[in-house]
Image (cartoon, rainbow, N blue to C red):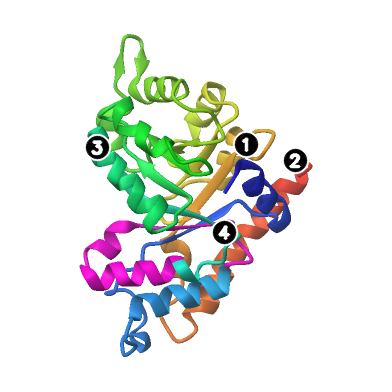
Amino acid sequence: MTRQELCDQIRIKKSFLCIGLDSDPAKIPHHLRSFPDPVFEFNKRIIDATHDLCVAYKPNLAFYEAQGVRGWTSLERTLEYIPREQFIIADAKRGDIGNTSALYARAFFETLGCDAVTVAPYMGRDSVQPFLNYPGKWVILLALTSNEGSLDFQMKVAEGVPLYEKVIRQAAEWAGPDELMFVVGATHPEKFDEIRKLAPDYFFLVPGVGAQGGDLEAVCRYGMNDEVGLLVNSSRGIIYAGDGPDFDLKARAAALEMQANMKKVLEMKGF
């Protein structure tokens, strides 16, 4: 998916919502567990209930890989089922030496057909470059994440600047805003204005709104650019909004609440 196509979907749907498919077999409703592929059935109903309210889905690979071959099959079926207008993010957080990264890139972009993959920058440019060799595909680079442990390294100051700032500045020399995004956690709202100045034209994937306590209003106030520039993710707060037979309706209600808030912001900003 191109940048223009993504921006068009945001305007059409009045939404920049990304729904994380962190589908845990232990948490899906009991009435689905008799299905041959309970995880896929869960994902299918979530997608049916929410696809008109979001612009992206983000399967977290760990929830599928932990199930072995069965989980991989659920993932493949889910990716095939997601409507084509959706931006599909493989939340894999890969990052290895170049030849290994090249195979990861092939797996997510060719075999699975995803639009984007999350990548860890710790090993440097040659570990990221193979993911950038696919026109129309995206790298979403970890910059300032939403978890508590982000304080351990990402906030550490060396040579006068925090590590996350070095990552953003350096990575912006590797690729432009048509093929690179940054992960910036909603749990650091005080940093959004500063980070937007560092990367004015780049999209940010923003986890941490909802279950982790991030503030959508603050993210929008300081993180938006002239093309919106945000994909705000919610996983548990939407897909586990209910656990009964009407779980999909509860998921829709949670997604609709977020989309309605996004619509207000977009209209206020003139989108």
Where does the image place residue 4, in percent across and percent down from the top left?
A: 66, 43
Where does the image place residue 131, in percent across and percent down from the top left?
A: 38, 39
Please state which amino acid type lies under the numbered disc 1: Met
Q: Is residue 135 left or right of residue 166?
A: right
Dividing the picture into quadrants, the one containing residue 240 is bottom left
Distance from the alpha carbon under mark 2 to that under mark 1? 9 Å
Please state which amino acid type lies under the numbered disc 3: Asn
Q: Earlier in the sequence, mark 3 or mark 2?
A: 3
| 117 shown above or below 251 | above
For marks 3 and 4, give the one nearer the viewer. 3
Q: Which residue, given by chain and number where applicable, does mark 4 sit on? A: 86
Q: Which residue, given by chain and number where applicable, does mark 1 sit on? A: 224
Q: Which residue, given by chain and number where applicable, does mark 2 sit on? A: 269
Element carrying mark 4: loop
Q: Earlier in the sequence, mark 4 or mark 1?
A: 4
Q: Which residue, given by chain and number where applicable, does mark 3 sit on? A: 99
Element carrying mark 2: loop
- Within 10 Å of disc 3 (Cα), the crowding (few <14, some 14-19, many 20+) is few
In the image, what residue occupies the spot 35% across and 48% down? 106
Distance from the alpha carbon under mark 3 to that under mark 2? 44 Å
Query: Are circles 2 and 1 on residues that touch, CB within 8 Å?
Result: yes
Q: Is residue 20 left or right of residue 147?
A: right
Please state which amino acid type lies under the numbered disc 4: Gln
Residue 52 in view here: yes
Distance from the alpha carbon under mark 4 to that under mark 2? 23 Å
**Quadrant assignment for the C terminus:** top right
